[in-house]
Structure formats: C-alpha cells, structure tokens
C-alpha cells in the first residue's frame, strides 16, 4: 500500500509540473512582450523629443523665419550654408514599428504654434505618441 501512495504522490507532482510549466512559460512570454512594447513606446517618446528639438534648432539656424517642410531635411547638410546635418542618425525618422513619424509644420508665425510630430504607435492599439496634447 505504501508503494501505491508513493507512486500516486510522484505521479501527482509530475502532473502538476507538466501542467504548471507550460503555464509559467506562457505567462513569462506575455510579460516579455509587454516589456518590449513598453520599451518601444519609450523609444518613440524619446525620438519625438529629439525630432522636436531638431526642428527648433533648424528654425533657430534660419533666424526663426520658417520651419522645415519635411523631417528628412534635418538629416541632410544645409544647402544654404553647408552646415552639418542637425540629425546624425536617419533612423530617428522612423518609429519603432517601422513607420515614418508624422510631421505637420507650424504656422508662419513660430510664436503662435510649434510643429506637431507624432507616431500612430503600436499597430494593434489605438494610441498616438505626440509632442502635443
């Protein structure tokens, strides 16, 4: 009778491990995916701050007269004075999900409005990451 009880205990433990292990791996996978998504969102926020600052630098270089019409201009040497690009890394122009950042230049008067820069965020979520409210 003791052998049967030991066998039952061992089989129960093995069964619990066989059921619990896949559940644990599944939960760890979900946590990792959420962590990766949060890292991408944080990177997009940082990229947008970088782009926002680059746009302001561009405007200041041109004495506040106008905003760039395209973000790509920030990654190229200035044709007027051959100054180096404001952005050294063109990868900042694309969000972590592989889409170009959206950009809407400010109005003619820079004191009234600043340019809008945003990402539509993760493809499976209704989320915009912006430099405006």
Image (spheres, rainbow, N blue to C red):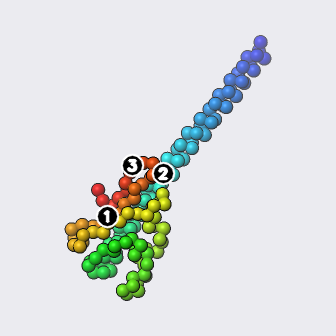
| Label 1 neighbour load within 10 Å: few <14, some 14-19, many 20+ | some
Which residue: 48% across, 68% down? 91
Give coordinates of residue 40: x percent, y percent.
47, 56
In this view, the mark in front (2 or 1): 1
User: Is 112 or 43 nearer to us in this picture?
Assistant: 112
Mark 2 or mark 3: whose residue is earlier in sequence: 2
State the image coordinates of residue 59 (x, y, percent, origin top left): 31, 76
Checking the image for residue 40, the label placed there is none
Q: Position of residue 100 (x, y in %)?
A: 43, 64
- In the picture, the quarter occupied by the N terminus is top right
Please report whichever mark, 1 or 3, sits nearer to the chain's N-terminal start.
Answer: 1
Where residue 89 appears, x then y in whole percent? 48, 72
The quadrant where residue 21 appears: top right
From mark 2 to mark 3, how far is it between C-alphas?
14 Å
| Residue positioned 70% across, 28% down in the render | 14
Q: Earlier in the sequence, mark 2 or mark 1?
A: 2
> Is label 2 in a helix, a strand or a loop?
helix
Residue at left 47%, top 71%? 90
Q: Is residue 65 left or right of residue 78?
A: left
Which residue in the protein does label 1 denote? 116
* Mark 1 element type: strand
Q: Quadrant of residue 81?
A: bottom left
Quarter the C terminus occupies:
bottom left
Residue matched to label 3: 126
The residue that appears at 64% across and 30% down in the rendered structure is 19
Q: Residues within 10 Å of mark 3 (few under 14, many from 20)?
A: few
Residue 37's disc is: 2
Between residue 131 and residue 17, name the one nearer to us. Answer: 131
CB atoms at circles 2 and 1 under 8 Å apart? Answer: no
The local crowd at label 2, few if under 14, some if 14 to 19, many if 20 or more residues have their Cα within 10 Å, is some
Number of the front mark, 2 or 3: 3
- Is residue 115 or residue 35 the one in the foreground? 115
């Amino acid at each position: 009778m003791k052998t049967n009880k030991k066998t039952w205990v061992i089989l129960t433990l093995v069964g619990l491990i066989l059921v619990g292990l896949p559940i644990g791996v599944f939960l760890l996978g979900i946590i990792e995916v959420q962590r990766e998504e949060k890292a991408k969102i944080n990177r997009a926020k940082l990229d947008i701050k970088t782009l926002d600052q680059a746009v302001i630098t561009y405007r200041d270089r041109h004495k506040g007269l106008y905003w760039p019409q395209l973000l790509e201009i920030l990654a190229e040497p200035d044709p007027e004075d051959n100054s180096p690009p404001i952005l050294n890394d063109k990868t900042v122009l694309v969000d972590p999900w592989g889409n170009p950042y959206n950009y809407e230049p400010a109005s003619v008067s820079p004191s009234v409005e600043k340019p809008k820069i945003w990402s539509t965020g993760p493809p499976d979520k209704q989320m915009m990451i912006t430099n405006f409210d």
